[in-house]
Image (spheres, helix red, strand yellow):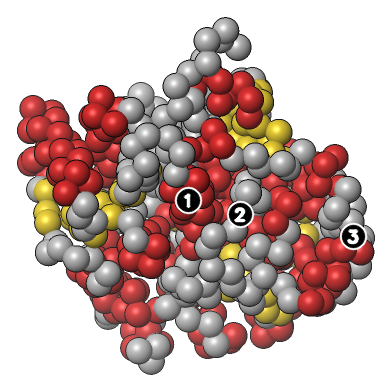
Amino acid sequence: MSTQIAKPIDNSIYLKLPYVSGLKCLECGRSYTLTDLKNDNGTINLFVDEFCFGPLDIEINIDEVRKTLTPEEVERRYNKGATFTMLEELLPVDNVLIEDMPFTPLKRAKNIEAKIKDLYGQDIQVYLKIESTRTDSFKYRPTIMAFNRALEDNAINIIEPKNIGFEYCSTASTLNLADTVNQLAKQYNFGSLLFVPKSIGDYKINKVNRNSTEPLEELTYEQVSDRGKKKPLIEKYANELINDIEAGIKRRKVVVYGDNYDAANNFSLAVIDTANTIAMKKWGRNVVFGPNSTMRPPYKEGSKTIGHEIALDLKHKYNLPEDKHVYFIAPGGSGAMGCSATKGVISELRELDIFKNQFSLVIAQSEKVMPIVRAYSMYLAGVPREDAEILPGYYEKDSNKLIPWDTAGTLAQSIAIAKPGSGDQALDLIIETGGSAIAVKERQIVEGLLDLKELEGVSSQDVGGVTLSALYNGVKNGTFKSGDVVVVGITGVGLDVMENKLKEFAKGTDLEERVSDLF
């Protein structure tokens, strides 16, 4: 630790966070106490380890939590009213400043169970975790925790200048994150600058843009693929944010980005970094946050609540026996949701003796974009874990040329991430928990969405087709067997966002009539 205490660069140094031990690097294992973070950096809002550049994760002091959060107390709270912030001791907050919400539904899928029994002869309990949040997406969970951190900072209002705090947020997204950020920015009075890849289509772009205050802008592939043109664009957007803050203006703007999600995400990060560099020179503090980047540690803590809810509903609503093996099928975009859900169940509820069932993580991806599945397959084939890399593409047989994943070509646009930020952590947890990674074909995505609607009455976005078809594939390959309990993550609801692409895919095939009947 430095002998000289750093100047505060935001108000997070005044947060007490009594149940948080600090941050830990998921790459090298280095830990940082809150005191060290405050003294050395003038903030606790760090997301990358300065030594190895690995991702930082919040460590909860389970021994301290245990004093209050007993199994009996959890059951009392659950019966009183199960809500998102019910287990507040496990959240990185001093004060909950965001609007609470009830648990999202965990539905027993008996018709899907019957289909599995009929086709494969396996008796499997199937549950659907349907993320019908206020923004129709799982992304509400992590994003609202990042916003709570920004709201707490602004509410403390101690460091100078007191009239400036976190004023803007920025991110890249294929739909749900950007839509959630724009809605929350409007609700909690933040400006927003969002970058969405052009490949998601006009319907999704317009859905994200419905809460904007400004007309859509577009950056062409020619603009963003040319380094000489890209840097001035980054500076342009960063300076626009700073000028707005100086003028007391908070706009909400969506920019259509002419490249894939990963490139749009890097561009957003560069805008945030450039804007905060300017702000540090002007005001001595950061003013722009990225919910899933610069605020990634609290963001991921919001994600883990899906694990809390699954476990508590299985235990208290469905009275699941403790000897049942539970698998959670999570869609594999960045991988963070599956990792966080597993942390919430195994590292927290199991350690607190609240949920004792064996819990395994399964990641589901499209065959067109499956970096985690590919690495897991290599591991199963005998490749040492350290050599089973998460790569932004694949090698054809007898070739050294890396073929990029087809991020623009899959129906599963919401998880079409070639470079998953939490991919290595997800792979490690799959191995540690005895889980799996399963890929599905494009046709199976459509068939999965049809089954969800026709058999269970659930209207899902693309990810539901991926996760349900991963269940079927897992039964066929022996991952899931009679007696197992499988929770399928339906992490975005609403078939409307899929209408055009589903009809286009099904046209002229035996699926055309069934798809047409959905709308």
Label 3: which residue? Answer: 71
Q: Secondary structure at mark 3?
A: helix
Q: Which-is-in-front pick, marks 1 and 2?
A: 1
Query: On residue 367, which mark appears?
Result: none
- Above or below residue 196? Residue 48 is above
CB under 8 Å between discs 1 and 2:
yes
Where is residue 326? Give x, y as percent. 78, 60
Type of amino acid at the residue the image marks with label 1: Ala
The residue nearer to you, when weighing 26 against 95, is 95
In-image side of 162 versus 229 (left or right): right
Q: Quadrant of the image for the N terminus?
A: top right
Task: State the residue at coordinates (57%, 7%).
Answer: 3
Alpha carbon separation for disc pair 3 and 2: 23 Å
Query: On residue 95, which mark appears?
Result: 2
From this viewpoint, is residue 59 visible?
yes
From this viewpoint, is residue 53 visible?
no
